[in-house]
Amino acid sequence: MSAAGLIIRDAEAADLPAVRALLVETWHATYDGIYGWRRVAEITNAWHSLDNLQAQLARGEIFLVGLIGDEIIATASARLERDRAALLTRLYVLPARQGVGIGRTLLQVTLACFPHAPVARLEVESQNEPAIAFYERMGFALQRQARFDGREDTPNTLLMAKRLFAE
């Protein structure tokens, strides 16, 4: 596998079923060992429903897909925060396509959508060691530990940040 032929473009409504399938597959591969299959299914059904993905698309946030041929193999999304920081809200690559530079390229394209953001931030599950290592390789550093959205029933996360340019 390689990143050859990777095309990154804005997501469209017709992409959402494939994006949802990608998210479900990736979440199960990543989090079943942490939370168990049933809890991962609950989270993906809530967070990655077609209605939620459609609402995100309608909000006009950055919502990208990565394709090789006609297959959607990756997705990323981000938004600008009130303090002008770029908040990466999603970056997933199909498990079979990981490790060949697709995530790195998709992250770079996503962050390039925020040319005036002084910093990029993200949350990553504290037990997702491969993702933490990936973001550290991409220049992100640990800021603090928290619960996703501050709620006790959501994953334990690490907040990471990366300076994008000097103000």
Image (cartoon, helix red, strand yellow):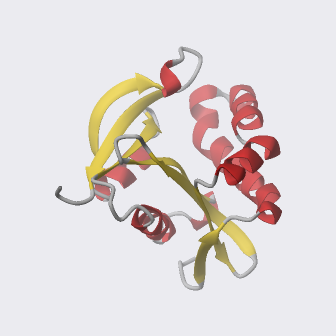
**Residue positioned most to the front:** 82
Indicate the quadrant where residue 137 lies.
Answer: bottom left
Nearest the viewer among 23 and 162 is 162
Drawn side of residue 138 relative to residue 128, left or right: left
Q: Give the answer, above or below, for where 155 lies relative to 80.
A: above
Point 53% across, 14% down: residue: 152
Drawn side of residue 147 relative to residue 5, left or right: left
Residue 5: % across, % down = 59, 85
Q: Is residue 92 visible?
A: no
Q: Quadrant of the N terminus?
A: bottom right
Residue 48: % across, % down = 72, 42
Q: Quadrant of the C terminus?
A: bottom left
Residue 120: % across, % down = 35, 50
Q: Give the answer, above or below, for where 130 lies relative to 19.
A: above
Point 43% across, 66% down: residue: 104
Point 36% across, 35% down: residue: 159
Q: Give the answer, above or below, for where 54 lies relative to 95.
A: above
Nearest the viewer among 138 and 133 is 138
- In the rendered picture of this protein, how many numbered marks are placed on residues? 0
Point 63% across, 60% down: residue: 94
Q: Give the answer, above or below, for where 97 lies relative to 86.
A: below
Nearest the viewer among 122 and 132 is 122
**Residue positioned most to the top:** 152
Q: Is residue 6 visible?
A: yes
Residue 36: % across, % down = 66, 28
**Residue positioned most to the left:** 166
